[in-house]
Amino acid sequence: MTHLGKFNGVLLVSDFDDTLYGSDLRVSEENRRALDYFTGAGGIFTVATGRAHPTFAPHAASVPINAPVVLSNGACLYDFQDDRVVRETFLPRRAARDLQEVARRFPEIGFEAYHQDEIYAYQPNEVTFHHLRRAQAAYTERPILEMPLPWTKAILQQRNPLLRSVQRYILERWAEHYEAIFSNAVLLELTAKGSTKGGMVRCLARLLGIEERNIYCVGDNQNDIPMLAVSAIPFAPSNCAQEVRDWGARILGSCDESCVAQIVAILDKRY
């Protein structure tokens, strides 16, 4: 039996979809029990997700978090206990014009833009419909220049390899303005330059007084690599993207094998 407080000063941050949240659209009981043990012994647990406030909020009460959540791929830090934004960044206002240029260059592309708690869609496609059904989110279809500003993020959507070309197009032209990074193979996330999961995890750690040597992160895709880079041990489920595996993450069991519980077991031996 562990003594109370063995995880004091330890921060564990998990990606949500396909890492903590399984293919059965739930957080496993094994993960819940492990996180209850971790937080009960003084640990700090939270989520860092590409989901924005309206698409993560329905899950916030059902996930055993005890710290603000990193939302919108690092563009927002939100305290669900106090129902307030701790920190938020926005895409530059030029994003609407730039994405209109992207849409002309790649007419097959669709995207979602996030303004406050509203989701606006341009040319929604099968990826859009699947993404929003899974998130149980409503949207308004609107021409790009008629979408209200500012946006916390945008998600460009289409099948690969087109999105790889879109990513190159954006970064070759406007890398000083944007982060353009995949959250899965069919979702390319656009946030303001410097707004990443890694940057916001560092911000959260500073707010909580957590030393970087006591930060542990787990994630499955390209957008998780910036936070894996700040993790004392960078963890990934076995269902992770090849890019994460090649980057050098420590591979665990899959999301559906309760990989977060496996991390708690590792930390239990480490502390």
Image (tube, rainbow, N blue to C red):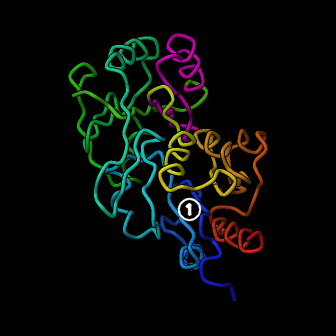
Residue 130 visible? The answer is no
The amino acid marked with disc number 1 is Leu
For the record, the magenta segment spans 163-191
Assess whether residue 162 is covered by the magenta stretch.
no
* Quarter occupied by the N terminus: bottom right
Q: Residue at x 43, y 34 (%)?
A: 155
In the rendered image, residue 243, in percent from the top left (x then y), is placed at 72, 38
Q: Quadrant of residue 265?
A: bottom right
Q: Residue at x 32, y 19 (%)?
A: 96
Q: Nearer the viewer, residue 161 or 204?
A: 204
Assess whether residue 169 is covered by the magenta stretch.
yes
Residue that mark 1 sits on: 20
Number of on-image labels: 1
**Is residue 220 toward the left or the right of residue 27 in the image?**
right
Q: Quadrant of residue 256?
A: bottom right
Secondary element under disc 1, as helix, strand or loop, is: loop
Q: Nearer the viewer, residue 136 or 270?
A: 270
Q: Quadrant of residue 58?
A: bottom left
Q: Is residue 58 above or below residue 138?
A: below
In the rendered image, residue 179, in percent from the top left (x then y), is placed at 52, 27
In the rendered image, residue 165, in percent from the top left (x then y), is placed at 58, 19
**Is residue 121 toward the left or the right of residue 243 in the image?**
left
Query: How many C-alpha atoms fall within 10 Å of the one at disc 1: few (<14), some, or many (≥20)?
Result: many
Residue 119 visible? The answer is yes
